[in-house]
Image (tube, helix red, strand yellow):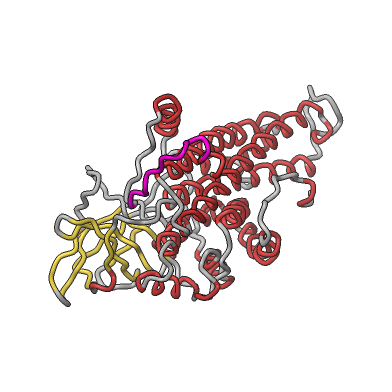
Amino acid sequence: MSDHDFVWPHVPTEDFEHLAEKFRPVFDEIREGAVARDRDRSLPHEAVALLRKSGFGALRVPKEFGGFGTSLTTLFALLTELAEADSNVTQILRGHFGFVEIVLHNADGEWSRRWLTLAGKGELFAPAHTEPGDSQHGRFSTAVTGEGNRLELNGTKYYATGALYADWIHVTANRGDTAVTVLVPTNAEGVTIVDDWDGFGQALTASGTVTYDHVSITQADIQPAIGRAAHVQSVYQLIHLATLSGIGRAAVRETTTYLVERSRTYAHGNTETAKQDPQILQVIGEVISKVFGANTAMLTAASASQRFFDKLVSNQASEEYRARLEIEVYQAQVTVATQILEATTALFGGLGASALSRERGFDRFWRNARAITSHNPLIYRSRQIGDFTVNGTPPSNQFSLPLPSNDRDVESQAAAI
């Protein structure tokens, strides 16, 4: 089965094919070991190293800092292809690309220039925001203490996805009554990273615990936690949707290859080979269509995110634009999650018991998709979509600076986004 036999949505950007041609050999190399890594729980250090060496982490970094300066739409399309190779690796890089967006919004600032320069050189960043146990919005037990040149960070974080593979961790903490972001080297004295994530899906992302025990930091490593670019929430969510889209593509690819190579059929089958059985072909067609729909929804929302970012950097964005972007992404989330979970279940409908082999690893598609879709429960997204549609209630804008309101007709703004 060759790539041109799969009809996926067109990516509407000028540089996608050029960048895809550059990175597809890397994706192919990563794909080769994906089933074995999942089966043996072997962490993909080599895969991340390949991406680092290729410059993949600098896709959104401006060219002046050594990156490719590509669009969000191209980024998500490439992340989809990476997830098709190994969805764990895409999620490992989620915090990295999210942090790049945070600093990219103000690329001329001294703080941003420092980190964009490092990202352009291939350094990777991981997040550490969630804390174990009871939590409160805007309050963290992880804290920065001290004065002057004697500052230190203490605390514990969980869901620090990708920290084992990164060079820096961006940590949310409290400094007195103020929430701040602290950049900490992963090899700093007092930093301990533990791979204790025990989920049955996305098991190789190292989404575990990081502790900070009297870690020395400097004032230059600290920034206020509020005020990040208003599009960042959509970026974090769209990386999940790109990951799910890639999982769906991988399920289609491997299932199709399995059927093409399968010599046996069933006693109650309709033809001499499974690949010619019209009922099995119908199952495959339905699965591919669900994956196509998910990919289309993801790319549509990705384009909306890029248009919003363009408005943001030209100071033309508003709260109304932001709210509509978030709702569009939420609608895509519900669509993608539903379609991919259905697709990765339905594909077993015509495959037979041999498809359950651990050597093939078909179960990882549903397990990994289930893990991704559990990160932001759909019940909340569906409720927010309904509340916005019926009552005009915008979704919350956590950790971002409020954008100016706009008196223009809301419907005219929808067309722009």
Please tell me which residue is depicted at 63% across the width and 60% down the height of the picture.
27
Is 405 one of the magenta-colored residues? Answer: yes
Task: Answer yes or no: is residue 294 visible.
Answer: yes
Depth check: 151 or 314 in front? 314
Is 82 one of the magenta-colored residues? Answer: no
Return the x and y of residue 8 as percentages of the image width and height: 71, 45
| 279 in relation to 289, above or below | above
| 115 in relation to 352, above or below | below
* Region in magenta: 401-412
Depth check: 176 or 43 in front? 176
- Residue 332 in which image quadrant: top right
Return the x and y of residue 56 as percentages of the image width and height: 56, 66
Please tell me which residue is depicted at 39% across the width and 36% down the height of the picture.
394
| 390 in relation to 140, above or below | above
Depth check: 108 or 172 in front? 108
Depth check: 117 or 347 in front? 117
- Residue 22 in which image quadrant: bottom right
In the rendered image, the quadrant that contains the C terminus is top right
Please tell me which residue is depicted at 55% across the width and 44% down the height of the picture.
416
| Count of marks overlaid on the render | 0
- Provide the major secondary structure of the magenta segment: loop
Return the x and y of residue 26 as percentages of the image width and height: 64, 65
